[in-house]
């Protein structure tokens, strides 16, 4: 059971609902926003920051989604693992590619830059003080300074808010395997993920 009640879309602050286009989205698409909506000003601030990351992104949708799902695995955030963003699917994120996240260092369908970014995300999520000059020198061979700031900011958003979302236990409308005992680890790779509607369709 969720540990904080999800608000219905009708209960959202009107400005927040308009900002998110919530009237064109399903209840499931709005989790965990439906919990954050208890504090509208914080929910709006989160939406502005996440929106800026997407609107001004210099990293590909594909890489951002791979990072999000790998971090969701570390966080064991089930609502994060069960979902795929349509824009990322359109940018080449297939379920076969998601399966590569089990052992990204061995995956042949990931680029060298993607494998390195995923190694950075692994460390940021699990052992951030192990990230030093050597890794940043490696990253600089593939990413500009602007891309590195976005890479770190995206990973930080996924780590921090993903861990918080995991504690909220919003699993009631997820596929069955995500509703098992919270102490039994699950993975984002599997046959039952659901895909959000494309951004253009949401705005229609």
Image (cartoon, rainbow, N blue to C red):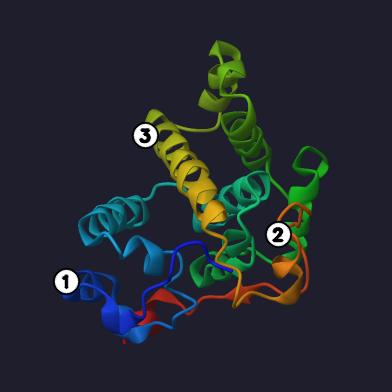
Q: Where is residue 183 in the image (x, y as percent from the top left)?
A: 75, 51
Label whose residue precedes the other's in the sequence (3 or 1):
1
Q: Position of residue 170 (x, y in %)?
A: 55, 66
In the image, residue 48 sits, relative to residue 1, either above or below, namely: above
Q: Check disc 3 and report the residue beneath it.
A: 146
Q: Quadrant of residue 123?
A: top right
Compute the Cα span from label 3 to label 1: 31 Å
Asked whether, in this view, residue 134 is left or right of residue 95, the answer is: left
In the image, residue 146 sits, relative to residue 196, either above or below, namely: above
Q: Position of residue 200 (x, y in %)?
A: 37, 79
Label 2 vs label 3, nearer the camera: 2
Label 2 vs label 1, nearer the camera: 1
Depth order, front residue of 21/132: 21
- Name, please, the residue furthest toward the left: 15
- Whether residue 71 is visible: yes
Label 3 vs label 1, nearer the camera: 1
Label whose residue precedes the other's in the sequence (2 or 1):
1
Compute the Cα span from label 2 to label 3: 29 Å
Compute the Cα span from label 2 to label 1: 33 Å
Element assignment for label 1: helix
Q: Residue 15 carries which label?
A: 1
Q: Check disc 2 and report the residue beneath it.
A: 188
């Amino acid at each position: 059971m969720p540990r904080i009640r999800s608000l219905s879309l009708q209960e959202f602050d009107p400005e927040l609902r308009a900002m998110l286009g919530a009237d064109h989205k399903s209840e499931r698409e709005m989790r965990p926003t439906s919990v954050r909506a208890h504090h509208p000003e914080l929910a709006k601030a989160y939406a502005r920051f996440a929106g800026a990351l997407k609107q001004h992104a210099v990293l590909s949708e594909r890489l951002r989604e791979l990072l999000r799902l790998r971090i969701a695995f570390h966080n064991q955030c089930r609502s994060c693992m069960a979902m795929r963003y349509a824009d990322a699917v359109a940018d080449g994120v297939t379920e076969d590619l998601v399966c590569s996240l089990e052992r990204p260092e061995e995956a042949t369908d990931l680029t060298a830059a993607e494998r390195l970014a995923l190694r950075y995300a692994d460390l940021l999520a699990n052992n951030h003080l192990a990230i030093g000059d050597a890794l940043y020198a490696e990253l600089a061979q593939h990413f500009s300074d602007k891309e590195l700031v976005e890479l770190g900011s995206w990973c930080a958003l996924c780590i921090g808010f993903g861990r918080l979302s995991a504690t909220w236990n919003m699993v009631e409308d997820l596929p069955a395997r995500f509703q098992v005992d919270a102490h039994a680890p699950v993975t984002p790779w599997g046959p039952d993920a659901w895909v959000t509607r494309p951004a253009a369709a949401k705005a229609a």
